[in-house]
Amino acid sequence: MCCVVVKTWMPRDTSSIAEILADARVWKLKDASAAPARPVWSTGKSSLDARLPGGGWPTASLIEVLLDDTGLGEVQLFLPALVACQRSATSGSGDAPWLVWIAPPHEPYAPALAQQGIDLGRLLVVRPTTATEALWAAEQALSSGVCAAVLLWLKGTDDRWLRRLKLAAEAGGSLGVLFRPERHRFESSPANLRIIMSQGSPYTRVDLLKVQGGRPGPVDLGGP
Amino acid sequence: MKLRAAKSRTADLFAATPTRRPNVSAPVSLAPQALAQPSLNRLRPKQLWYAAVFPAMAQLESFAAPLQKLCLHAHAFTSFVSIEPPNALLLEIKGSVKLFGSLPQLLEGLDDCWRRLALQAHSATAPSTLAALWLARAGRPAQIEDVELLPTHLAKLPIACTAWDVERLQTLRAMGVTHLGELMRLPRAGLARRLSPALVRDLDIALARQPAPRRAFVRRERFRERCDFETEIEHVAYLEKALEPLVERCARFLRQRQAGIQALQLKLRHREGPATCVQLGLASITSERRRLSDVLCQKLARLDLRAPVRGMELISGSLRALSASSLDVFAGFTGAGSRDSAPQLVERLRARLGEDAVYGVCLIPEHRPEAAWRRVHELRLTAAARVEEEVIDQKLPRPVWLLNEPLSLRKPELLQGPERIESGWWDGKGVARDYYIARHSDGVRLWVFQERQSKRWYVHGVFA
């Protein structure tokens, strides 16, 4: 199942279908059920996994989470993935990759993270003073190749920086997660995945705003 | 009486294994020669030590600096020079004999060296460190190359040349022992018990029966180079360019010495006023040019230049041995697309954001939630076995965020609890609280507690 979407196409005299597909300007949209090229990490919620291409958070990509207030279980969605990527690398090469949390809104509470299974010896908390420094630090960490995941909390930023972050995440093979306020939902974003989390009754509502290789729409997460 | 009895018993003599050699019937007077270890007799000694004692230096108050200067002179003759406080040097010269032609020529060169420095020196050469030192202290310019000859030469020395403490020497004199030969005839076990095992060990070392590793003097050096500009530089970007050759030279300096550094200092000189000092620390010992310039540039980018710069000076911290783990030759090849190492990332972040802005967290076995963790600034950066931390087994959920200070609130809608935490009465920060998981009106899940005495409600954490 393959569908070709041509964005801007300069017609040429000789163009077979193979040549068209080989062109870098051609984007290929695959079915959500197709096996992904890169590994994915489970979100810990089966209903959300089912909606994501490959069945989990994609690695080497930028994920944007839009929410206005902390406390909606947004970090909880990523903790299983963080544990899994630390564990999988440890069993392979012996040196666990790092997790970097940049500008978290409060102090990350070590006992809670240890309880979830995170190796605290490989967790780095960075507290930059300005948004630009935070973005710079995130870019450095993402592209360094020693970090499995970089979580970044920001009030606001522009499209150009997000593109840099995405490229850095792809270059370093890390998972980049950006948390920012919901008012940015109508801005364009190069993130591979955009999610809106909002308060619902009784539980948090999750909306997929943009899914590369998947279908946007609301997700029912179930219990807390 | 007891002493004389011991002297007459050859079996108890200061020997390694005399009883296993029944064919050797050593008379008492010949004991030292007979008792040298047979295995060492046949071997040429692997080491040859030259000791130089400078009697004039005994009166000096601080002997370290002059002796270190002498070490630099002695390095012309051998690479292994060791300091013996307060006034002696020990040189291992076995390897240098061939280079200088012969032993007398080498010794002549050394004597000449001390003469040129107008220093009076007593010297001696022996196959063991202590033998050479004792001979030199006694002022006997012996040149012993054979381990077999050691006991005869040492036997004639007075016990004072050993520089053992006064009390012990007095005890020995009271026993009638004035020379080492008499001491060597005493039974080992008795000596060790009555005086000290260290004394017996010293004798073994002197007779080359026991190895005695020594610490070599390593010259303390650091990279220090300055460059002055023809015109004043006002922009940091130009400074970075001008810094490149300095860093390159620093890296080459380190590479030649197989050493690395962990600290670096850059001084920027202005036309007037004090120089601007930029201090930087590296997360691990390194000698790589790329890492050094990387960190320097990050620091410079943050620098606010007070005045134009006329010149600069790069000063390294003390040189450290490069360990195998700090050579990251394969760092770029371990994982897909990995280009940096963790220390590099951390030092780059710290150089730009400040030392305190980058930290880790660790657990503390403690029941009070606010005391159960702390920040750590010394990070385990290299591949290390996972440290199993002592954790209070907690089955009850803990929030991802902990507030620095608990915030007061009205009683919320409780979902789960209570969990009673009562602890810390011993250090004045006692807590008596009932913790609950609560839901705020806007849907946020909170970790709240009720102070048991005041019955007031506080929020302490957020489940994110």
Image (spheres, coloured by chain):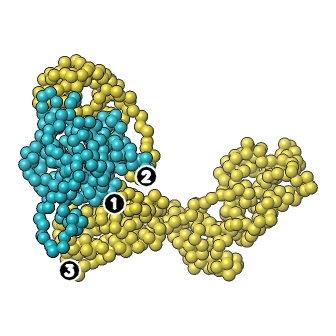
Kindly report the distance in space between the C-alpha atoms of the residues bearing marks 1 and 3: 42 Å
Kindly report the distance in space between the C-alpha atoms of the residues bearing marks 2 and 3: 52 Å
Under circle 3, the secondary element is strand
Q: What residue type is labelled 2?
A: Ser
Judge the density around disc 1: few (<14), some (14-19), many (≥20) Cα neighbours within 10 Å.
Answer: some
Kindly report the distance in space between the C-alpha atoms of the residues bearing marks 2 and 1: 15 Å
Q: In this view, does A111 lie above or below B173?
A: above
- Colour used to depict chain A in the structure image: cyan
Q: Which chain carries label 1?
A: B
Tell me residue B232's x, y (percent): 19, 77
Q: Mark 2 or mark 3, which is nearer to you?
A: 2
Q: Which amino acid does label 3 sit on?
A: Thr
Q: Where is mark 3, residue-wise?
A: B231
Tell me residue B313's x, y (percent): 31, 71
Under circle 1, the secondary element is loop
Q: Mark 2 lies on which chain?
A: A
